Image (cartoon, rainbow, N blue to C red):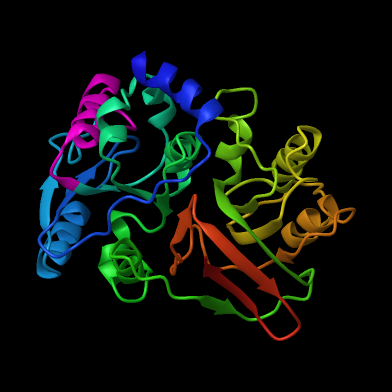
Amino acid sequence: MPGFINFVVMKIFNNTFIAPVPLAKGDKIIITAPAGRIEPAKINRARDVLIAEGYWVEIMPHAWGTWNMFSGTDDERLGDLQQAFDDKECSVIWMARGGYGLVRILDKLDMRGFLSRPKWVVGFSDITLLHARLVGFNVQSLHGPMVAAFGNFKESGASLALALLSGERPSFSVPPHKLNRQGSTSGVLIGGNLSILCSLMGSPDEPDTEGKILFIEDVGEYLYRLDRMLHTLKRANKLHCLAGLIVGGFTHMKDGEPGIGIEVEYLIRQMVEAYEYPVCFGFPTGHLDYNHPLILGARANLQVNEEYVSLSYL
């Protein structure tokens, strides 16, 4: 597993985050599906939008496929992802969807070709696994909308994702939330899906959160499981040393009968009550109709005050 060994070496010795080259008109974008299956029509629609925007698009052969809950067998999905990572003409690898399955192939992915010419990787949810791996290699990536979002290109965050990939760095503001903790901070932005982040504990991809701005989101979890995840992060000393915390969408949460008796935002706020760093709730990123893209691995400034919350890149 040469890519896996390289990962361990670079995680120890390299402290500089690399931003892949900005996307330009005419550049090549690859769409691949390393995890769950997806309707081919959604892939084709995304391809058509990206072509109309002026890009060259290639779709990996098994992205349209089905094999049980996955887009293909482990070997087929790995082959597609490896081809995309090794492609010297490609500027962006856009994930078709999340779901489940990336963890089954991640440690077989050879990163050497990719690291010789880093490219942007776009996705969220299960793709948090790959974002965490890239953070370990100190390469920036884009936590953002996937193929389904191109059905509403302007309003889903997909158009902003293209702008960020092209080098634009606009600041973004959201209204205040009653549970916010005010303050101003800066640090490298990391994170993603909370369930996936917790699954990384004890692995070589375990996130280093010290001095970082951590972003979390999730979907469809029972509240007691969410509570357990938060305790897992706290007991692993991942919460006390943050520069800041951004809480994104926690959608379609479920409670049992009897339930845990407390809402998501209050669970999270209680978990970080003893700390002093700024905390922002209600950031519109995650499993939402509008999924605001975030550049993971980028140094960012987070300001939380009575009037607004702003996030900007440094």
Q: In which quarter of the view is residue 201 placed? A: top right
Q: Is residue 47 magenta?
A: no
- Tell me where residue 4 appears, x and y as whole percent: 42, 19
The answer to whether residue 79 is seen in the rendering is yes
Left or right, 86 with reference to 237: left
Vertical relation: 74 (above or below) 135: above
Vertical relation: 132 (above or below) 22: above
Quadrant housing the N terminus: top left
Q: Of residues 2 and 79, which is closer to you in this image?
A: 2
- Tell me where residue 115 appears, x and y as whole percent: 32, 34
Q: Is residue 82 magenta?
A: yes
The answer to whether residue 218 is seen in the rendering is no
Left or right, 148 with reference to 55: right
Span of residues in magenta: 67-90
Residue lying at 35% horizontally and 65% vertically, measured from the top left? 164
- Tell me where residue 313 appears, x and y as whole percent: 51, 66
